[in-house]
Image: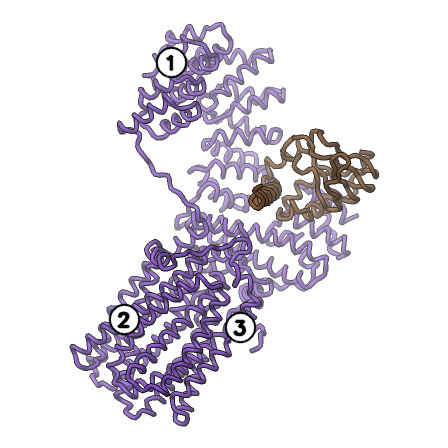
Chain colours: A brown, B purple
Amino acid sequence: MNQRTSDRLLLIEKVLILKSLSIFRDTPENILADLAPLMEEEEYEKDTLVFKEGEIGDCMFIIYRGTIRIHKEATILAELGEKEVFGELSLLDAETRSASATCVSDCTLFRINQEPFYELIDTRPEIARGFIKILCKRLRAQNERSVQRPN
Amino acid sequence: MRSNRFWLNLLNIQRSEWPIVKQLFWLQFFQGAGISFFFTAEFARFLEKFPVHELPWVMVLSAFLLWLTGFAYTVLEHHIPFKKFNEGIIVFMAGTMLLVRLGSTFITDDWLYYISLAWFYVLYLLNNLEFWGIASRLFNIRQSKRLFGVVSSGDIPAKFIGYTLALVFVPYTGTLNLLLLGVVSMLISIPFYRSIAKSEHVHFEHHHESHVVHHSTHPIKNLYQTFIASKIIRRIAIISLLATACVIIVNYGFYAKIKESYRDDVELAKFIAFFMAGLRIAALITKTIFTSRLTTNLGIQKSLFITPLVLVGLISMIIGISFINPDERFIFYIFGASSIAIDVMRTAINSPVLLTIMQPMPIHERMRAHNIIKGIMDPFATLFCGILLLVLFHIQQEINLLTLCSTLLLLAGGWLIGIFFVNREYLQMLVSTISSRYFSQDDFTLNDQETLHKIKDKIRSGTEQEVVSILSMVASKQNPLSLELLSLFLDHNSDAVKKETIRLISSKGIRAMRKDLEQVLQSGNVPEVTKEATFAVCKMAEKVSEISSLAAGAESQLHFAALAGMLANNSRSIRFSAEEKIAGMLRSANHADKITALTILHSVSDEYDHPLISIFLSEEKNPDLIKKAISVVGKAASGETLKSCLNLLPQYEKQVKKALLKAGSHAVNQIETHIQATGISGRQLTELIVIIGKIGGIAARSFLEKMIRGKNTDLPATIKSLYRSKFKADHSNRIHLEEVARGYIQYAIELVFMQHTLMKKNQAAILLHNAIEIELTEIRELLLCLFGCMYERESIQKSRNALLANKKETIANAMEIIEVTVKKDLSKYFCLLFEESTIEERCNALRSVYRETEFTEISSIMQRILSEKPILYQDWTKACSLYVSRKYTIPIDTVYYNKFLGADNILLQETAQFAIA
């Protein structure tokens, strides 16, 4: 992380960013309004390592501006652009990161930490629903794949 | 036909449905015309050659032909793709009509006349199976209710035109050439069918995109099983049979008298054509204009009664008049009128409503039900009527209208009873369609010797987990608990089983197990088990002397367990000595002593409340100790303790809320007193209302009901809590709740009109539009909570889940449940507001009840929201209004910005600052 800037976006605009993400597509904005204050804006310069494979993950990131490369050492797994999310599973558990994330360009990311998120879902379980839906979708896709390719 | 708003409103069709409805209408129009040409030709030829009393033989013959066709249809429909199969049926119908035409030229034997007329019934059946099979795939239950009347009315003008043409052409062309017109008409329907199949290919290929449906290899067995297994299908089939039988008999009587009155064959054909044409036009008007409105306004269940009740009325009138005026011609006219009325009602009301009733069924069950009704019961009705009429003619040697009337009265009586039974099953079917998973856990007894023996074996041989689950089963199912079983559990090798058993003995206060517990104490190998046993023995002791050694124990953990047990004891003297020790610890200056005392009190929070806790909560300054002390509040908490606890709500909201929930129903009175005494409002009041709803019980329900009637309350939170508390309205409070529901419906209507205005505006409006959608969803939720309190809670819950599933079919079923369960004036507007349709269509339907002025500008909508009228609106909606005002420079009065600068909600406050900057 290179520098932390003061919040430039209004909370209402952060809500609109959250709503544009696939994990929160079905979550109403009035509920996302409670999540928006947890978004911490962070600026990263090109080639900065956001997190390293094997680190304990305790937050997720939303790409507001820039491109992020997800990789295992030299092997590139994906390149993510604006309004994409990475590290989201770390909001739910504290396992190690399965891959590293590095900035391909100068990036503005929003970080959501696990602890305040846990406190929020205590009172706003609807927030967790978006996550559960995505996980179910992934699990179904995984099942489908294993049925199609039994070997 | 122009698809303008007037016609769509008149026909009760939504704009998006219009293309498919139009295609279906024309499909049915051309097929209906083809069949009417065939009928006119063959019926006139038959009556020309044979007397009317020969007609029942055609019925008997047609019954067997219909069964054969139904069988072939059922077998083939599962083997041929839906699209090809239906096209094949149209070609087959056209082909057989052509064959009859050619056959009639070369064969002049009597049998051909019988078979040709009987074939009309087969064509009629095939057309029905094919057309309704397609329609039931395309529409859900809510659409079916509105559209079946219109789409099926296509055959009525077709038949009207067919019969009119027959009337004109028969004297010149002869009857046989009408068959060729029938063939052409049938073939013309093919392009319409193909167009439907193309535009609705999803429905024609797989019903669900990701769900491949496997057909059974035993379709007939399936039909039989469906008939046996489904009560509602059985009942629908029976009323369908009775309805068909009534129509056949009434028509037979009428034709017989026509034949007697019109001896000249051409005149006879003309009369039949004229009669049929008149009948069809009456049916068309009824079906297109009245059917959907009747079913929408009366509901499906009541609409079913219309036709048989009219039949009973008319037939009773005929019988009554026959005693006053026995003139046969007069009776014949009334009978003719009745015949027309019944035929019209059956075609226009009864058949579409019966089909609508089947719509909530799963697709394949619905198709099977349809096949049972059309393919099995209709032929059975024809056979039954054929035999009955042959027997009657054999006995009376004439066709007597009064005898037919008496028979009709009997059948109509059965029909009405059948409808009553169908209606009883209907709601159940809707509910079970939504929740296909249902299981009931029957009560069972654990006191018979054989079961006890098996349980003992399992306790001895089972693993730890198995034995723990047997223990919990025994604890919940056996009363009184078997001491023998408890001893066996205590002897188990597992410490977890021992601990659970001791807890059970202690919670149930089974003193007879004291000796066994003492043995556990003596063995004293495992500290956790010993601690549990110490607690249990001290809790159940009758004298202080029994436990003096335990209370004075040197080992601190066992000493604390003994103190906790003594506090939970029913004897005042035993409790007293422990109470004194705890008081000393609470007053101690030592932090650790206080923690220990609170830990002990926490372990017995549901059985004991220490008198010092209330003071401790008021006076203690250390936040950690306060949090620990709040956790001591439980079911046994006194009024004073709860009062002190509630006073801590602003600083320790999370802990206090948890404690109040733990305290349960007797916290309700204290919360009520707290609300009244402190006059709290805003978020904290809402939180307390929510807690009361979660606690539930009589006191909670009574308090919340009072809150609903009061003015200074958070009405949405109170409504939701009332529902959560399982409130069931009686007559007096139902009236008030209905008023509240009507109010919310009005608010929702205004919101829809806001959306209507926003629709026409630019990008700025999207944000507001979406915020209003959230408001509408919230009102929908509140209305469902109110309905749940006033009507059948379980059905409303199913409907709510179906709405949350947010699929076209589930929403349709949810609306149907609401319509059946909720009072008419509420359900009607609920469905109009929340059913799947465009905003424009919703506004058209609701315009007559919208009391406010329509919004013309986005600024007037924003000002309405920010003035918090007629509802408070959510902070998000208000924030959106403020944001849009600044972002898109839409000026509004500054008073609306200032108002929210000091809002509790950070988002609203921040947006107000942004807007005013």
The mark lying in front, picked from 2 and 3, is: 2
Q: Position of residue B177 (x, y in %)?
A: 41, 88
Residue B306 in percent (x, y) is at 35, 68
Name the chain under label 2: B
Identity, as a three-letter code, of the amino acid under mark 3: Gln
Query: Which residue sits at x=44%, y=12%?
Result: B530
Quadrant assignment, res B345: bottom left
Classify 10 Å Cα crowding around label 1: few (below 14), some (14-19), many (20 and above).
many
Check contact, mark 2 vs mark 3: CB within 8 A: no
Discs 3 and 1 carry the same chain letter? yes
Q: Which mark is residue B616?
A: none
Q: Earlier in the sequence, mark 3 or mark 1?
A: 3
The first of marks 2 and 3 along the sequence is 3
User: Which mark, residue B517?
Assistant: 1
Q: Which residue was labeled with disc 3?
A: B23
Q: What secondary structure is marked by label 1? A: helix
Q: Of residues A107 and B308, which is closer to you in this image?
A: A107
